[in-house]
Amino acid sequence: MKNLIKILFFILIFNISNANKLYSQPSNYWTVSFNSEASLLAGAVIGGNSGITSIYYNPAGIIEVENKMLALNANLFNLSKTYYKNVLGTGNDLDYLGFTVKPRFISYQYKTPKSDNMVLQFALFNRNSSRVNMYDQVKQNVQLIRPEIKEKYTGYFDFSKNYMDTWGGFGLAYKVSENFFVGISSIVSYKDFKYLKSIGIYINPTENDLPDSIPYYNASSGDYERINMYDVRFTGKLGFRLKMEQISYGLNFTFPSLKLFGKADVTRSISNTGIRYENQDVDDVFLNQSSTHLKSGFKEPFSVSLGIKYTGFDKLESSYFTIEYFHKIKTYKAIDGTKTTQNKYEPASDFLSFKYGAKSILNLALGFQYVQSEKIEWLYGFKINFNPYEVSLENEYQYLNEFVASPSDYYHLSVGSKFNYKKLSLIVGFEYTLGISKNISEFVNFADPEINLNQPLFLAGQLNHNMTLRTNMLGLYLGLTLGN
């Protein structure tokens, strides 16, 4: 066991020393729902009561779990409705109805037979996932290619994104004294990312009968991107907890993730054909590249969280507070089209590179627990989940491609019940999420088309920052915990 502790701390030290080489994830950091007691308290459990999710929130809390505790948690359903206003240009809106069902959290805790002061935990869980599928088509009359001819303008937008972030590993907690605990977690994550964006614009005369001097024509612009990517990384956590009679404090450090292996297969093409500008034919443009095994990865930032748990004298009510700081991540190439994972594969160019980055943020969570009786407890939680997305538009990253993104701040409200019977605990809970974001760049502008040779799609309008995003999400969760 002493050798095991030495190995775990060596891994943590190695992880810290390589922090300047490491990578981060897309999406909001607190978009997690494990349907445990901790989740229904909005994750405000750094200072206490992290339970089976201690391996994630604060590994020092592992010491508090019972011997040979097995936990199974499932997401019965997650229903979301997202409304995109002006997403394809002013007046061109979209809405998306999402429905997902998947397992969430499996955990097993075990006290070492030689020491009651040490507890191990093994867990496999889905930390983050998102699925988006959108399609729409806009038609209107224009006079762009030949102003003297009435033309039909057709634009379509087809987009899908599937992102899954699965974590698995083990944690170890040690009781230094009756009031002070320390813990570490060693976790491997597997990120799977599938992404497709296809935009097509077509202009042709509304009638087939044209003057003899003008042949029938068809102008088009197209933008196509397809990515299949996976990324395997290591993440280390170090946690502390100080527990007193009514109040306890928690501190947790999450270190930047270390890339183990992974790659991206990318195809991208841009085309502009049959276009006239100022009564002159414009040369056709065909840009197409495809490459496999490109160097890639989504970074995880350094973060530090502080939590407090306060329990009343009657021990029937407990209040929770957690705040977590996430350090910024400078803009980097999440996919580098100029480098491959092995020399035997051919790289392409920055035409296939995609950038990503994150700003520093501070998230806040509050929780409340009421013990109605030995058999029933009520759990409430609220958290603010800011979006960290931020990329540089200057220097080497000025012209790099960006993922289609709709960054949004989320506000989560959760409520649930915990039913206790001997060594069995059943948890049923709901979580409502509201996402709001304004002044986002349009995905494409079909509303105000023009011929603009200074952008990838010659037949699209100039992008404006007038998109508004609103998301409403409802999740129903079920959890079962069994201890000996």
Image (cartoon, rainbow, N blue to C red):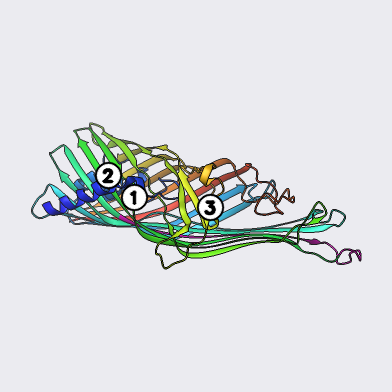
Query: Dot 2 lies on which element?
Result: loop
Left or right, 400 with respect to 462, comes to left
**Crowding at mark 1 (Cα within 10 Å: few <14, some 14-19, many 20+):** many
Residue underneath mark 3: 403
Of the pair 266 and 88, the residue shown nearer to us: 266
Whole-percent x, y for residue 398 in the image: 55, 45
Of the pair 317 and 209, the residue shown nearer to us: 209
Pointer 3 and pointer 1: residues touching (CB < 8 Å)?
no
Where is residue 250, by image quadrant? top left
Say what amino acid the circle numbered 1 marks.
Ser
Query: Dot 3 lies on which element?
Result: loop
Whichever of callouts 3 and 1 sits on the residue coming sooner in the sequence is: 1
Residue 257 — which label? 1
Whichever of callouts 1 and 2 sits on the residue coming sooner in the sequence is: 2
Q: What residue sits 72% from the left and 54% below the top? A: 459
| Above or below, 368 relative to 351 | above
